[in-house]
Amino acid sequence: MASSSAPASVLDDHCFRKEFNQQLFESHVRRKKVISEVGFNLNNDEYPQIMEQIALRGWRRLAAPMTGVSKLLVQEFYANAAVSDEEVANAEQLPYKSFCKGSCG
């Protein structure tokens, strides 16, 4: 008699830290909307004091961030940042790190 159970998922270690993170991505994170950061634009003749501080502090790149994002890369990052209850229970100190190796999909 053949089994009707679904095959176990195989960890895609190119994209995910652990199977827990892959399952979280597939069941929840992939469905979430990614909202890009909203920047601001100042013309060179507006607010000269602010423009001067941006220049003095070397914040030109910070004041003009990239606006294009990869939805899958952002979702992969958040899925990999999650820790399972098992990791919490077995760790003296959690690493609080994530990684993105490539786009899953």
Image (tube, rainbow, N blue to C red):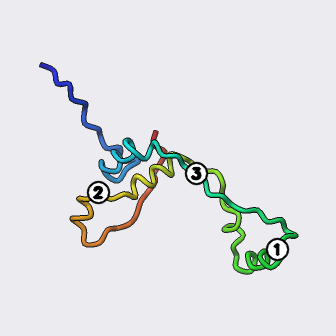
Pointer 1 residue: 47
Q: Identify the residue at horizontal 83%, vertical 76% (top origin).
A: 48
Q: In the drawing, does residue 92 fall left or right of residue 96?
A: left
Q: Earlier in the sequence, mark 3 or mark 2?
A: 3
Pointer 2 residue: 84
Indicate the quadrant where residue 44 lies.
bottom right
Q: In the drawing, does residue 59 fall left or right of residue 30?
A: right
Pointer 3 residue: 35
Instruction: Estimate the x, y position of residue 82 in percent, counting from the top left.
Output: 37, 57
Indicate the quadrant where residue 81 lies.
bottom left
| Disc 3/disc 1 C-alpha distance (Å) | 28 Å
| Disc 3/disc 2 C-alpha distance (Å) | 25 Å
Q: Identify the residue at horizontal 79%, vertical 74% (top origin).
A: 51
Instruction: Estimate the x, y position of residue 38 in percent, counting from the top left.
Output: 66, 58
Looking at the image, the residue that sits furthest to the top is 1
Answer whether labels 1 and 2 touch (C-beta < 8 Å).
Answer: no
Disc sitting over residue 28 in the figure: none
Q: Residues within 10 Å of mark 2 (few under 14, many from 20)?
A: few
Q: Is residue 15 above or below residue 54?
A: above
